[in-house]
Image: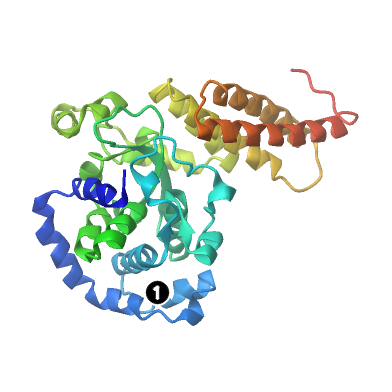
Amino acid sequence: MNRKLIVILLLSFIPLATINAQESQNIKFGHIDRHVRKTPDSVTNNIINLHNYLVEPCTNQTEAVRAFYFWIIKNIKYKNQIELLYDPTVLFYIGSNNCSSPVCVLKRRIAVCEGFSRLFQYFCNQSGIECYSISGYITKNGALQDRATHAWNVAKVDGVWFCFDLSWANAILEHTGVKSKANEFFMALPEEFINTHLPLIPMWQFLKSPVPLEVFNAGEETIIKHLDETTENYHFTDSILEYNKLTKAKQRLKTADEIFRVNPANKFNLAMEYYRYARIILNYEGDVDALQYYHFIKARKKLTKAIDLFSTSTDISSKIMRLQSMDNLRVIERIIEQESENFIFLD
């Protein structure tokens, strides 16, 4: 699949009825876009200075997210455009290898979808805008999805939740040069965005009637029918509030539980959450007390489970993550062995 075909596939997601709305956005945000184009090189090497420059003319959150969105899709390049819709095992999860941290993305000016989403999230959070980087399934030529291979954003802008996909917008802008077409993925409504993007867990859909994976895989007509006919009243706001009360480590385990509940066949993403949980525990700095020793024991158990899950697949993503998990497991086991004289753990 060549790059031109990728852009055609992306453009096929854009309804003709949205063209006028996109053109009006170009007019509405003209002064913001012009400000972004004039960004001096002197501020682009420091993430805080760049943020401060981008928000200078902004009078509300909507203008701020526009500045962040437009700067990123113009200046960050996708690491491999062909991965965007073609490779079912896209490696956006391999964080350090793919440079997903905001500072790294800004320095290298190259990223995969997770890098785009995390840089946008950083800018939003820096401005006091609630924003999340979301992992999930995407439509791929009608192919059924059994694992999440993409990342995008949701942000609460001036009190309303909207969806953003900066890596897809970048692909369109990069290959067509037409800014209005990239607007399809700027401040998209959740009930429209769900036609092409399904979060791993229901609360990130921001819908009162969350769309199940089997409905998503059935296509847009089935999704619309589900939204029109389902009377469920899911309180996603309450779910997000409870989620945010958890520690980062417990958020990973909560996500793992939800992945298994929603799609038990998705072993890869379940393993990824166990891996991420173990990484959080492993990054602990400080004296190891009884509670932290217990966390290391639990991390060892989850990482062992992750290795088993990764071993069930032969794709390159699973193989690489299995090796990384094994490396981290050896480190955790050394820590447990070193501290074993100080604690007795009854499993």
Viewer-nearest residue: 322 or 315: 315
Q: Where does the image place residue 40, in percent across and percent down from the top left?
A: 43, 82
Can residue 342 be spotted in the picture?
yes
Point 39% across, 64% down: residue = 72
Please rate how many residues cluster around mark 1, counting C-alpha atoms within 10 Å: few if below 14, some from 14 to 19, many from 20. many
* Amino acid bearing label 1: Leu
Vertically, is 142 above or below 5? above
Q: Residue 213: which quarter of the image? A: top left
Where does the N terminus fall, quadrant-wise?
top left
Vertically, is 301 above or below 278? above
Point 42% across, 53% down: residue = 117
Can residue 164 be spotted in the picture?
no
Which residue is denoted by mark 1 in the rendering?
Answer: 54
Q: Residue 218: which quarter of the image? A: top left
Q: How many marks?
A: 1
Where does the C terminus fall, quadrant-wise?
top right
Q: Where does the image place residue 202, in percent across and percent down from the top left?
A: 35, 33
Q: Residue furthest right?
A: 341
Q: Residue furthest front?
A: 2
Q: Where does the image place residue 184, in percent across and percent down from the top left?
A: 22, 55
Q: From the viewer's perspective, is 226 left or right of 340? A: left
